[in-house]
Image (cartoon, rainbow, N blue to C red):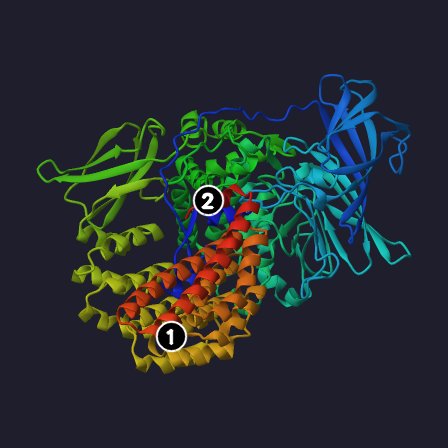
Amino acid sequence: MKIINSICILLLLSVLACKNNKQVTQQKNIPAEVVAEAPKAEENAKPSVYRESRERKIDLLHMKLWISFNYQKQHAYGQAILKFKPYFYPQNIVEIDGRGFEIKDLGLVSAKNTNAKKSDIPLKYTYDNEIIKVNLDKLYNAKDTFYLFIDYVAKPNELKEGGSNAITSDKGLYFINPVGAEPNKPRQIWTQGETQSSSAWFPTIDSPNEKITQELFITVEKKDVTLSNGLLIFSNDNGDGTRTDYWKMDQPHAPYLVMMAIGEFSIVKDKWRDLAVNYFIEKEYEPYAKEIFGNTPEMMECYSKLLGVDYPWSKYHQVVVRDYVSGAMENTSATLHGEFLNKTHREMIDGNQEDIVAHELFHQWFGDLVTCESWSNLPLNESFATYGEYLWEEYKYGRDAADRHNHQGLNTYLSESRQKQVNMIRFNWESREDMFDSHSYAKGGRILHMLRKTVGDEAFFKSLNVYLTRNKFKAAEIHDLRLAFEEVTGQDLNWFFNQWFLASGHPKLKIVHQYSDSSKTYTVTLKQNQNLENTPLYRLPIDVDIYESGKVKRERIIFSEKEQTFSFKVLSKPDLVNVDAEKMLLAVKEEKKSKEELVFQYKNAPLFLDRLEALESLSKQSGSPEAQEIILAALNDKFWAISKQAIDFTSKFPSDKKVQVKPLLLNILNTNLKSALREEAIYKLADDHASPDLADLFIDKLYKDSSYAVQAACLYALKKVDQDKAMQACKTLENDKNSDIVLTIADIYKDAGSAEQNEFFVKSFKSLNGFSRYSLIQVYSMYLNRMNDETVNSGLPLIEETARNEKTWWIRLSGIQALNGLVGNYERKEAELKSKIEVAEGNKETALVFKLKDELKAAEEQRKKIDLIVSDIKKGEKDPNLTRFWDK
């Protein structure tokens, strides 16, 4: 699963005003107005409860399910036949997961009657709305199989809904716009099984260490398309306006991976080798389906060759649905994506979601073929899928692109580490959804990269082959992975797995360089400065590159003590000694290098992170000609992300040197094919080189550049140089639905708009979703703070509705923060009016006093009205993520 919310949004939020719209548009995943507080990192939590793997008493072998739907009631009608056998010990009771069912019939059927629509032998059972405890007709041993028939109604919307930051709902089965009440939204049904929500729509043993095969007979209206795991065997016209599709999955997989998606999808066909690879998408986006998903077959070939294990399932289809409760889900052979993948060609100019496509595909091996045996072992799924993103970037776009992606992952983990540091494999979680964090994803991906660099590429991929082959169609734990690596390498790798997977934290390293000319010795002293009460003393294999006399020599050192010094014999002082030459360490590093060494490193060391590290260090010396020379040279770096960073660093130049930057930025704007660079160049021209003569350039690019991000940057820049022209341009673009454009216009209107622009905010909010909604509400509240009471009152219903009823807690938070902002604004207004009244009374300006008192009374009434709304919302809010914010 690719989690958007929990990975990108930290658990504690506080709102800041937008400093400029660049902050709104640059971050695609994180609302710019949302920043993380940085509480102290937790000490390791002491396990209060050991979260053991679910005991396997009964093995569920196969499910046959007939299912149909009532859109009005949002019910599913199911008839399931489940094939069981005792796992080892004899059993006369079977416990089945089923949440919120109305059970109509339950009993045994014979092996010859597995198309039955009623039980042959009714059985007694008890049911607590979660577990169906069935008393069998006799004691069955491990050689016996038996079949249970259950006729039931699933009522997902009548369940007490749970959820988490990662997966915001656990209803399992979702009816989207079921009665057509929402205009411009299709009617759909889809499922979400992870972590244990499949049992909300069919009876099962809802545990990741269970594996089943399945048959689904899905009855829908004839206009609808269905998708499920495995192959579509046939479709039957029922003669009553409905059709039944029969999907068969004959390879075992975990119940949480069972899926359905139903809707009026267009199907765009593709293939990999001889397997069908289809894309299910709304009609509007059908022309772009192969642009969105088209690299999938090449990814399948890439991963199959790297792993030495061919894609293991009978087909691979992908579907995009509305109102999904997370990012994407790797259901076996049928991945489900959230609607943010719906993009036009123009929107994809600024970036597609290829990392998510790669992530979910890699899960088909890691998570689906081999599944974590418990949620405590989730990194066996998610760390690998995250590293799958790296592997695809490396294969398709090169090492620089992959290393940039990995570096972003490191920063994501380090951000979370300021709030918590926990074991990767942990058995003391409060909620299993707690495992879906930046540890399991971002940190885990970096750990696997270190493991690869530690054992070497050949051993790494051979070990993955052994792990997958040995555990295929089974559940595994972290030690299965370790044993596979030990078998291949012949090494005892407990040290690696213990310090990285079974402990918390990360190294904090200090690196000190020293050269002795008399002994022709170069020494590197390494110190581990992390808190050893909570974090291990690490053993770190590190590659060191020594650049001397035009040559480079690599040495591997093993750093395993609190402090160690390593000596290298050299002929003369090296031009550079590059510690962690592979830039693979998951660590915080403190290291000083001379200006000359940094210049040499930028020009000669081969990796993206070599150049980025040198550039970042030189930017702190931007007053020196040498640093300026490298930063200017980096504007034309071979990799666009380095150039983008260099553009930003030119802000640190002295004013006389900035004169040289402007023509270089204009050249980038006119020649570079990468929209991210053109966008950055415009922002930099606006921030550091703003002048009225640039207005025509910005207007020209505004209407001619095909990139939405560049267009939004032009609006921002135009506001800097000519606010009237910016307002005129905004009015011509108000009907554009692109979030970059909408948020930029909103940012301009918040400062320069009048009551006339209020309708723009209301209309735009309805067209946006997710992070963009958060951003818009924040900007809207700042706009309303400038408006009169009449306009505020017209905007209050939207903000109140957001604070009360938005499904996602952090979007509700945006409404709460907006309401509190309005209250604060009226409090300030009251204080100002009281001060003016005091002055007017002193001057005996009676008429003015009466006027000001009327204004004060109106302000007080407005504040009290909004305060009442806030208080009422507070009473009804139960989400713990929100209750912590009420005092702010």
705 or 794: nearer the eye? 794
Q: Say if residue 607 shows up in the picture.
A: no
As measured in the structure, the alpha-carbon distance from the residue carrying label 2 to the one carrying label 1 is 34 Å
Q: Is residue 608 left or right of residue 109?
A: left
- Label 2 is placed on what type of residue? Leu
35 or 229: nearer the eye? 35
- Helix, strand or loop under label 1: helix
- Above or below for 522 versus 665: above
Q: Say if residue 290 shows up in the picture.
A: yes
- Label 1 is placed on what type of residue? Lys
Q: Which mark is residue 323?
A: none
Q: Is residue 78 left or right of residue 464?
A: right
Mark 2 vs 1, N-terminal side: 2
> Mark 2 = which residue?
11
> Mark 1 = which residue?
719
Residue at x 77% of width, y 36% of height = 63
x and y percent of residue 106 in the render? 84, 31
x and y percent of residue 9 in the render? 47, 49
- Above or below for 348 versus 871: below
